[in-house]
Image: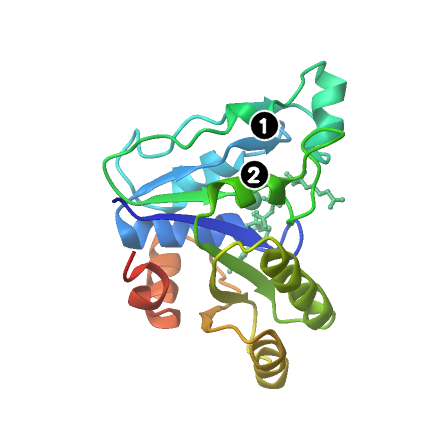
Amino acid sequence: MTKRIVVTGTDTGIGKTVFAAGLAGLLDGFYWKPVQSGLDDETDSEVVARLAGLPSGRVLPEAYRLKSPLSPHRSAEIDGVMIEPADFSLPAVPGPLVIEGAGGLMVPLNRRTMVIDIFERWQLPVVLCARTSLGTINHTLLSIEALRARSIPLIGVAFIGEEVADTQRTIVEFGGVPQLGRLPHLDPLTGETLREAMIGGFDLALIAGGE
Ligand SMILES: Nc1ncnc2c1ncn2[C@@H]1O[C@H](COP(=O)(O)OP(=O)(O)OP(=O)(O)O)[C@@H](O)[C@H]1O
Ligand SMILES: C[C@H](N)[C@H](N)CCCCCC(=O)O
Ligand SMILES: [Mg+2]
């Protein structure tokens, strides 16, 4: 069985795409963003293609490409598109697959279905990306509780940002989850600095080891 990992986050703009690019690169794998909302700026798939250092073709096409940078349910409505949960069948690829959600867990895809509903159906192991800055304890513990309530397997938390030791410890202790590592703010953010920070900041075996 090929390794498939879902990358989610406590919010939008948390650093999921950057982390997912680093992870897909380290795994020498594939990346899939099922729902892209917002097409005017560089899309998540384009960012990953730029940062992950993967051969072309390893970034799979999105299932939905929606124009407005809004919650997918609204962006789809504006485009006159109905997001169908049945469309989220997992692509078969000959290597590790990193899948990135849209925003946080309870982001609606239509008026009845949220991102977390698709994750529940997949039952794939999840990495939860979380900020280290103030406010993250609440958001991260709520996200962990939501995953547990649906029995979605959680690999652990990947912190993004500067080290805030007590915050990270508090999340890990209250949440009862492994801390997978931390990706600092990178300046400049390039394929090279990302790869180096991923190698230095994470134990890949903890994230992708076993099956
Ligand atoms: N480790 C990092 N170092 C430097 N910049 C970062 C880092 N992580 C994220 N950023 C920047 O922060 C912004 C948001 O990050 P990113 O696009 O990865 O968020 P996201 O969680 O994937 O958002 P979305 O919900 O839209 O998918 C981007 O401009 C990105 O370049
Ligand atoms: C447009 C943005 N960058 C993401 N693609 C979608 C974020 C949806 C967030 C919805 C919400 O939680 O209010
Ligand atoms: Mg993203």
Pointer 2 residue: 118
| Mark 1 C-beta to ligand 2 under 8 Å | no
Residue at the location (37% across, 54% down)? 23
Tag 2–tag 1 contact (CB < 8 Å):
yes
Q: Secondary structure at mark 2?
A: helix
* Residue 61 to residue 115: above or below: above
Colour mapping? rainbow
Residue at the location (71% across, 28% down)? 110
Q: What crowding class fits label 2: few (fewer than 14 Cα within 10 Å), some (14-19), or many (20 or more)? A: some
Query: In the shown orientation, is residue 118 left or right of residue 26?
Result: right
Query: In the shown orientation, is residue 77 left or right of residue 146?
Result: right
User: Separation of disc 2 and disc 1 at Cα?
Assistant: 7 Å
Where's the N terminus, which quadrant? top left
Q: Secondary structure at mark 1?
A: helix
Pointer 1 residue: 85
Query: In the shown orientation, is residue 26 left or right of residue 122?
Result: left
| Mark 2 C-beta to ligand 2 under 8 Å | no
Residue at the location (39% across, 39% down)? 31
Quarter of the rendering containing residue 134: bottom right
**Residue type beneath disc 2:** Ile
* Residue 193 to residue 54: above or below: below
**Residue type beneath disc 1:** Pro
Q: Could you tell me residue 16's position as x and y percent?
A: 53, 52
- Ranked by sequence position, the earlier of labels 2 and 1 is 1
* Residue 62 to residue 45: above or below: above
Quarter of the rendering containing residue 64: top right
Where's the C terminus, which quadrant? bottom left
Q: Could you tell me residue 146's position as x and y percent?
A: 65, 57
Q: Could you tell me residue 158's position as x and y percent?
A: 49, 65
